[in-house]
Image (tube, rainbow, N blue to C red):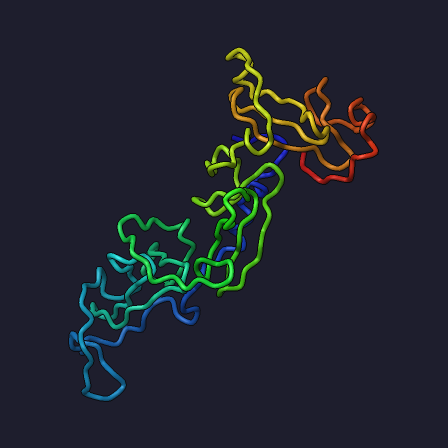
């Protein structure tokens, strides 16, 4: 449900643009077809030599297919034979959307419930695995997370009012993230006033008692979500909207402490 004050990208969608999605073999989209004269064993580079048969079945003659038990493991099939088993980079899992493409993706984007096993993690620095988005190790830090690539991390801070959602790998509203100790009431020390059901259904807005640049939207009259006004504006409780700062008495009283603050109204 859209709430004025935050663009969709601030709710975490922009993080997907930095996705750790990997085209595992960019130079090919499908295993080469080697003809119909193969034996059902893996051929080595030495003519007439064979290696041990890789157990398992190919769902189709050619392509890349998920391992039935391990989410970050997959198989390369040629002419109905498994010619290779491969692992995604640590922290990523195999995207089995199309057998024509060899792709590893973030686990938030793939359903691994039927193949839950994973390779042993290779933790490094603040990264529990070498690649991915990971919550801060301090349980009371709600709005920060690590973005890891090959064990190199960046500490990222969510936009004001949002917290890291470890289940979705994005920044989201506290009531959506459901992170212990990070509810709206715990973070902002604000509770929505009790109102009648008709008014509650309108998602009423209230000024932030501590800072006139911000306000709270009470979803269904119960769950507060913090939002804010763009630079040069403050929340006007009379109009229940962002307004020019000089039209807001609270801003006039406190203008010495108001700093430029960029937000979408």
Residue 91 falls in which quadrant of the image? bottom left
Q: Residue at x 67, y 36 (%)?
A: 264
Residue 234 falls in which quadrant of the image? top right
Q: Position of residue 31 (x, y in %)?
A: 32, 70
Residue 67 falls in which quadrant of the image? bottom left
Between 154 and 71, the one nearer to me in the picture:
154
Total residue callouts: 0
Q: Can you say whether 138 is above or below 201 in the image?
A: below
Q: Can you say whether 24 is above or below 12 in the image?
A: below
Q: Can you say whether 114 is above or below 77 in the image?
A: above
Q: Position of residue 64 (x, y in %)?
A: 31, 63
* 143 left or right of 58 in image: right
Q: Residue at x 57, y 39 (%)?
A: 162
Q: Position of residue 101 (x, y in %)?
A: 37, 62
Between 44 and 99, the one nearer to me in the picture:
44
Q: Position of residue 119 (x, y in %)?
A: 33, 62
Which residue, as the protein is rendered here, is positioned at the far bottom?
47
Q: Residue at x 48, y 65 (%)?
A: 150
* 41 left or right of 156 in image: left
* 123 left or right of 43 in image: right
């Amino acid at each position: 449900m859209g709430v004025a004050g935050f663009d969709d990208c601030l709710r975490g969608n922009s993080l997907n643009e930095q996705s750790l999605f990997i085209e595992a073999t960019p130079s090919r989209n499908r295993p080469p077809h080697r003809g119909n004269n193969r034996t059902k064993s893996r051929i080595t580079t030495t003519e007439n030599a064979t290696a041990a048969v890789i157990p398992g079945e190919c769902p189709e003659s050619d392509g890349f297919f998920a391992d039935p038990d391990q989410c970050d493991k997959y198989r390369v099939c040629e002419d109905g034979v498994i010619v290779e088993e491969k692992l995604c980079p640590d922290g990523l899992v195999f995207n089995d959307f199309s057998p024509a493409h060899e792709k590893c993706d973030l686990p938030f984007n793939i359903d691994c419930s039927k193949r839950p096993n994973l390779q042993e993690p290779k933790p490094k620095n603040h990264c529990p695995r070498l690649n991915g988005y990971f919550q801060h190790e301090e349980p009371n830090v709600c709005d920060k997370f690590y973005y890891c690539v090959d064990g190199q991390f960046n500490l990222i801070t969510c936009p004001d009012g949002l917290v890291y959602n470890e289940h979705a790998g994005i920044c989201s509203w506290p009531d959506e993230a459901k992170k212990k100790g990070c509810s709206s009431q715990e973070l902002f020390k604000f509770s929505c006033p009790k109102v009648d059901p008709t008014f509650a259904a309108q998602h009423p807005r209230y000024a932030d008692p501590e800072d006139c640049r911000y306000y709270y939207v009470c979803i269904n009259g119960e769950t507060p979500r913090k939002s804010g006004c763009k630079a040069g504006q403050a929340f006007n409780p009379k109009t229940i909207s962002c307004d020019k700062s000089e039209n807001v008495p609270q801003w006039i009283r406190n203008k010495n402490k108001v700093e430029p603050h960029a937000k979408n109204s």
